[in-house]
Image: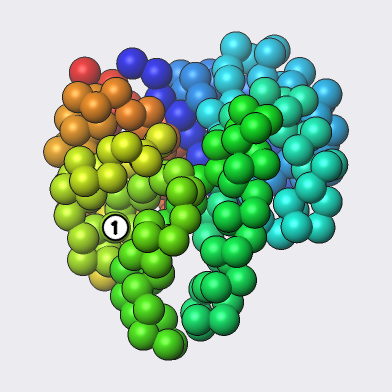
Amino acid sequence: MEYGLQMYSVRDITQDDLAGAVAKVAKIGYKLIEFAGFFGHSAQEVTAMLEENGVRVSGTHTSINDLIQDYEGTLAFHKAIGNKYYIIPGHDLSTKAKLDEFIDNVNKFQPLLAEQGITLCYHNHDHEFKPNLDGQIIYDELLARTNIGLEIDTFWAYAGGKDPIAMMEQLKDRLHFIHIKDGYADRRGEPLGRGTAPVKAVYEKAKAMGIPMIVESETLTPDGLTEAKICFDYLKAQE
């Protein structure tokens, strides 16, 4: 089994030393890298980080604003690093007007990226499952009004009152990745195996479905790499 890490998990070192962070994550045993920013590095530099450590980019968490502000430059960068999954990590969708604008942009860029071999995806938190200020359930609107791919964050689904395993089954035709993450229903995060989220059942479902598992563990306790190692060891113990 190959596992990925969302590099936000090690944000305590990525801003100052992205190359070192990639190397240390690879040394733990992760094979897939999901970037959360590039911190001024060129596409060539990012590609070298991947190649030197025998890892691959699984996707990136990148704002849709990058596409809006510089579509051609953003596309060129992602193609140059070999990224095939442009994952929007979240967006302010708190009103109908903001949600409508976002959906218009998704429906504009999703087919353009698809023509270039890149799948546009959305990563949820918990608020998308609750009414926004105008009473809309954001996740339902995205499902009904776009063809955007999905990266289900199973912890945030759990914290939002959803059954992540049922979601994975229901949305399997649009599901490209999951974030496997642990914590408590009150939104407090924990490394894998230390919270109350159904991570073992999520693991088994993802394995059965062949859905790549990306770890995101956010508490930096005591630091990002230690937490990433705890999570990796948990996953290996499930095999």
Vertical arrangement, residue 60 with respect to residue 97, above or below: above
Vertical arrangement, residue 100 with respect to residue 199, above or below: below
Q: Position of residue 218 (x, y in %)?
A: 45, 52
The residue at the far bottom in this view is: 134
Picture colour scheme? rainbow
Q: Position of residue 148 (x, y in %)?
A: 48, 48
Q: Position of residue 56 (x, y in %)?
A: 58, 20
- Total marks shown come to 1
Write down the quadrant of residue 40 in the picture: top right
* Rendered residue at 83%/51% (across/down): 70
Vertical arrangement, residue 128 with respect to residue 191, above or below: below
Q: Residues within 10 Å of mark 1 (few under 14, many from 20)?
A: many
Would residue 127 appear left or right of 105 to someone viewing this image? left
* Rendered residue at 39%/18% (across/down): 2
Q: Amino acid at mark 1?
A: Ala
Task: Identify which residue, 15 or 170, lies in the foreground.
Answer: 170
Write down the quadrant of residue 64 in the picture: bottom right
Would residue 38 appear left or right of 176 to someone viewing this image? right
Question: Could one spot residue 96 in this view of the protein?
Answer: yes
Q: Quadrant of the N terminus?
A: top left
Secondary structure category for the residue under label 1: helix
Q: Position of residue 108 (x, y in %)?
A: 64, 54
Q: Quadrant of the C terminus?
A: top left
Vertical arrangement, residue 95 with respect to residue 100, above or below: below
* Rendered residue at 37%/60% (across/down): 144
Q: Which residue is mark 1?
A: 157
* Rendered residue at 37%/78% (across/down): 136
Question: Could one spot residue 20 in this view of the protein?
Answer: no
Would residue 108 appear left or right of 58 to someone viewing this image? right
Write down the quadrant of residue 100 in the picture: bottom right
